[in-house]
Image: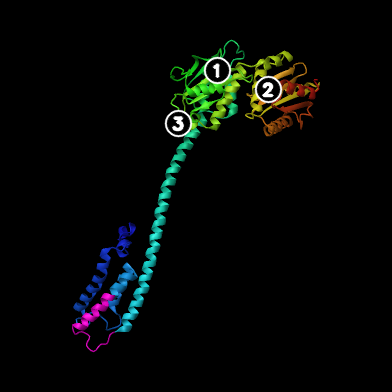
Amino acid sequence: MLSNLGDNRLARFLAPPKLGAMAWLEAPLLVVMAVLVGFLVRPDDPLIFQGGIRWSIVVVLLVALRYGSLLGSLGMLTLLLAWFACKALGLYPGLAFPELTFLGGYIIVLITGEFADMWRVRLDRAESRAGYTLDRLQNLTQRHVLLRLSHDRLEENLLVRPYTVRDALLSLRDVMMDESHSEALPAGDELLNLLADYCQLQRGGLYAVTGGGINPEPVALLGQNAPLDLEDRLLKHAFESRQMAHVQMAGEGYGGIYWVAAPVMNSGGQLIGMVVVERMPFLSIHQETLQLFGLLLNFYADVVQHGPEVDHLIDVWPGMPAVFGRELVALANLSAAKKIDTTLILFTPDDSAQSRQIVEGLYRGRRNLDGYWWVDQESHQLMLLMPMTGPSSFESFLRRVEEWLAEDYAFASLAQAGVSYVHHSLDKRPVKAQIEEMLVEAGNG
């Protein structure tokens, strides 16, 4: 019994969810069977109308509870026909038609059947809601499983590879040589491996641009690549327009093998190479990845093949390191293009030994990504180049410096420690003019 209740078999037997053809046959048969049983129990009163309880009407009530008011009315009609049949057989002599019994019984049958119909509708709605909820639960469960797998994959990727632009630039700077004039595109293999880590390249190549054309001999390859197709429409468009092109821009008629073609061009407008990608995840071809792709190539080109602006800076300030000048120009171009915020800060200590010691501490405590230039070694005047540093990041840097001063030197600020500073966010003006402005503001002009 309990097992039947658990899977609703007993409930479906007592109250069928749908009224089929058998129900129209079963309702009058139940009444007829009750009358036949009445003939066996009370041959002179088979309808059991005499006495306290009208048992034949109870059977009709059960029919109404099982099937509803419509078939309950059919059962009541069957009982009425049974009355006339009994009268035809000579039963109930001298007994008038019990209209109150039939009327009262029929009213009770209608009320009972209405409750059955109402609860059947409610149960149907409840089952519909339960079915819909079950479907939604299954869909949500599937989505949760997919989300969990995606989260685990993302967590794994974040553990094995960094994705920040700051780390990407730091890694790119680490793989390049200090002097890069001996090769047109130095550290090509390292550049492609870096692009594979950060932009998910799977197959691609780096090619030099010489004499106004692309040299088909690769400088570096990532994976097994086909020979360079110089007639590829995507590659020709990227080379002629000097802008990155990808397969989503090529249209449906494109049948080439390249997914992305990107120029390697420095800030002087000199095109020094092309990167073509034969394979990468299609979902990785989106704005964030492509922006990082172009940013890394621009930074690489400005550092390894700088324009005359860097040479001019070194001519004006011979003490400026070449790496600092290249990165300064490269980051200035990225800042002008609104790709990266970069801040220059110039520290000038007074004549005290403690203030100079503090400047040396600032030099030792700089980030790995920050460039530096000792503008005046004797006076310990230091300039820091801080990529990925906007106004809010610079304020956080100053708070950290003040906390360090308070903890180690009991000074509340740099001014109290005898160290003045000038800071400037790189913009689209010439780099030389921006440095001169800072030096004049610091009292070097």
- Asked which secondary structure carries label 2, the reply is helix
Packing grade of label 2 (10 A; few <14, some 14-19, many >=20) is few
Q: Please indicate, yes or no, whether residue 352 appears anywhere in the rendered image.
A: yes
Kind of residue indicated by mark 3: Glu
Packing grade of label 1 (10 A; few <14, some 14-19, many >=20) is many
Q: Return the residue nearer the eye: 156 or 252.
A: 252
**Residue 347 relative to residue 60: left or right:** right
Kind of residue indicated by mark 1: Gly
Lower position in the chain sequence, tag 3 or tag 1: 3
Residue 388, x across and y down, in percent: 64, 29
Q: Which residue is mark 2?
A: 364
Packing grade of label 3 (10 A; few <14, some 14-19, many >=20) is few
- The residue that appears at 43% across and 41% down in the rendered structure is 145
Residue 380, x across and y down, in percent: 75, 19
Q: CA distance from mark 3 to mark 2?
A: 55 Å
Q: Which residue is mark 3?
A: 252
Q: Are marks 3 and 2 in contact (CB under 8 Å)?
A: no
Residue 273 is marked as 1
- Asked which secondary structure carries label 3, the reply is loop
Q: Return the residue nearer the eye: 238 or 50.
A: 238
Residue 136, x across and y down, in percent: 43, 49
- The residue that appears at 67% across and 15% down in the rendered structure is 308
Q: Return the residue nearer the eye: 168 or 275.
A: 275
Q: Is residue 284 magenta?
A: no
Span colored in magenta: 77-97
Kind of residue indicated by mark 2: Arg
